[in-house]
Image: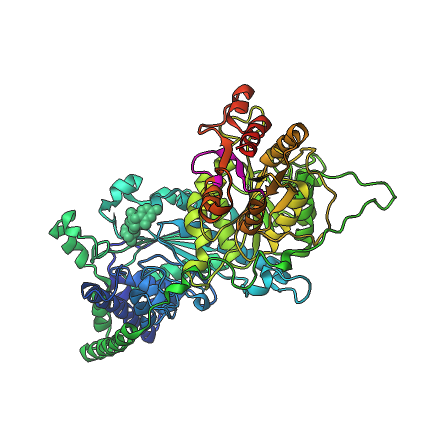
Amino acid sequence: MATSKTDPKLAMAANGAKKSRFYEGLTREQLIQAYRFMYTSRRIDDREILLKRQQKIFFQMSGAGHEAVGVAAGLALKTGYDWFYPYYRDRALCLTLGVQPYQMFLQGVGAADDPSSGGRQMPSHWSYPALHIVTQSSPTGSQILQAVGCADGGRYLSHHPNAAQAPTSGSPDYRQFKTVSFQNDEITYVSLGDGTSSEGEFWEAMNTAALGKLPVIFCVEDNGYAISVPVEVQTAGGSISRLVSGFPNFHFEEVDGTDPVASYAAFRRAAKYCRAGHGPAFVHAHVIRPYSHSLSDDERLYRPESERERDAQRDPVTRTQMFLLREGILDDKGINQLEKEVEAELQVAVDRALEALPPAPESVMQFLYSPDLDVTSSVFDTPAIVAESSSDGKKIAPKTMADLITATLRDEMKRDERIVIFGEDVADCSREEYLKHKLVKGKGGVFKLTFGLQCEFGNDRVFNSPLAEAAIVGRATGMATRGLKPVVEIQFFDYIWPAMMQLKDELPTIRWRSNNGFSAPCVIRVAIGGYLTGGAIYHSQCGESIFTHIPGLRVVFPSNALDAAGLLRTAVRCDDPVLFLEHKRLYRESYGRASYPGPDYMIPFGKAKVVQAGTDLTVISYGAVIPRALQAAQKLEREQGVKVELIDLRSLNPFDWDTIAASVAKTNRALVAYEDTLSWGYGAEIAARIADQLFDQLDAPVRRVAAKDTFVAYQPILEDAILPQPNDLYLAMRDLASY
Ligand SMILES: Cc1ncc(C[n+]2csc(CCOP(=O)(O)OP(=O)(O)O)c2C)c(N)n1
Ligand SMILES: [Mg+2]
């Protein structure tokens, strides 16, 4: 660990006058260029503020006061080589990396040609694939875990260079649509504000980076405020540097971020440390925020003039100009000339941007999902190839859902070196020497579904993560952005919520918000559901409709072993992010066991299965309710001759409307059955659609059977009363059939 500190009070004079020959390695030309970027950045902000006041753009977020640190990072790192997760104040960084002012104005007007998002995101939400500037969202801090995943992905690729190749033959998968590149000494840069360092995800990211010695530069651009909240209220003790100083494996820098030369030196040292593979670096840059938080904020409401005046003394643009003059790098004429050139360039850029066409309203649904690989298509419809007997002629017993999920993961890992598996407890044993010396057998997940995979594929392909769900999903997102295929596990659905920011605002939005510039197809396996006899409130939850409510996320929920194998393979090979819900009660159930359908068996998403054909009543369901509904339907037929058509949706987004519609047209009666709480549940949407679109076909109201609107209790008598039971289904079917 190394620590360097530039006293914020050390003004440019120290770096300038005393070390003027070297300028920390920057040439005079580079310093002029640095000033040009800084001045351009500030003037773009000024222009945008004017355009906003004229109502020609719709939002403005300035990078004012942060220009020096941004330019310094841009000069110390390599564009199109290193990876960048900047935040909204990083205009100067982006200019230094190669973004054109015109492109920034296109963001402001929300033009179709805006390369960041095609008018979908606010300005200053940078996304430029060729420059390795990864699409950015608005939640403060959610980029940090992804940056860690990006660095992790780069390192994995450098250890597995063959994984970067896309297969040229065989059935198509996501790899064909992803250009993967990496450098052995690449760095991932991520920045955030002082306020954002209060987010839990920041600490998860710091921990993960330190654990893995990952080449990430964390840059905290500390302007002393988070909107109106000052740093001493935000950060215990008032110094983020002090708080993070105990993290191992880090190189630390604290620097005056209004000084481009000192900041450059800090980034150079940080980059050297990271490129050498020693670990991550932390650059704490003290900057100012002269233009209030945004155009919607007036800092005079909470900052006195005296304080603002003090900041103004440190304005990086003015100070750099003074520095150039003092060092004789540019004279007055040179400064004027440069500034005139910038003004002229910006005028042209603004004029052009104001003429740019807006995006077409019909484009709004584009790029929610992969435009290249349709997960509902026949590409994913492949036959099961079942070996009836083993090599010694013995008949093979049908396998459980748990067995087939493990077998599918194993075969996919053999086929695709880009697959990595991580999560809580998923490894066989983190202390490898215990395995090596055969002291232990290994665990492989609390449900043992990943058992044996670490031993077979190595500990950089299957490993335990820290106990941090946001970190699991955020890191997977960053890795998937780089072209890997993380297949991660959330141990219990009940504990998915720390990852909700990543699952709602990040992973599913990446392709859409970047206008197909980036994508992050990965698989999140989640153990879900009740009927456990003792699982209680925190090991029994469902809640799938919360996720089917998120555009951009595929959600599947198999009810039997064969479907689990086919759907999981599709999830792994497809080009979209998938939430793969595995019902714990079904893992080892006798119902739905099957022989392994072979290493290429796939089921397309959005194709339901008719579990039992019938003519009198349609029951639409999925997951663990399927065997219960089947039991109820068989009883009803036995007792009353009612023939129920039972439909297993299998995948919930997309879902198979055609099969539902065809069935209801035949039976004229529909019951939707699901394990989650009744109100606002997944079945509510299905019921509403049937009522809306099949009204003329119905001979009875659309009914639902689901859990009571409470939590799942521990005592089995209570659990039975809460979750839908075969008898509840039987009674509902009977009533509806006779309506
Ligand atoms: C998760 C989240 N909470 C709240 C906000 C609203 N918000 C936007 S910026 C901001 C302050 C950020 O302060 P800081 O991290 O210091 O960055 P600065 O704007 O000062 O550069 C807040 C509260 C948000 N975007 N995301
Ligand atoms: Mg701040």
Name the image colouring: rainbow
Write the residue at 11% across / 52% down.
Answer: 305
User: Is residue 618 found inside the magenta-colored segment of the image?
Assistant: no
| Left or right of 614, for residue 228 | left
Residue 368 lies, in percent from the top left, at 46, 57
Determine the image quadrant of residue 617.
top right
601 in relation to 637, above or below? below
Residue 225 lies, in percent from the top left, at 25, 49
- Could you say which is closer to the camera, residue 481 or residue 268? 481
Q: Is residue 383 visible?
A: yes
Residue 664 lies, in percent from the top left, at 55, 45
- Could you say which is closer to the camera, residue 673 or residue 559? 673
729 in relation to 469, above or below? above
| Left or right of 100, for residue 428 | right
Q: Is residue 419 visible?
A: no
- Could you say which is closer to the camera, residue 724 or residue 253? 724
Region rendered in magenta: 667-683
| Residue at far right of view | 393
Residue 509 lies, in percent from the top left, at 43, 54
- Could you say which is closer to the camera, residue 502 or residue 725? 725
User: Is residue 671 found inside the magenta-colored segment of the image?
Assistant: yes
| Residue at far left of view | 305
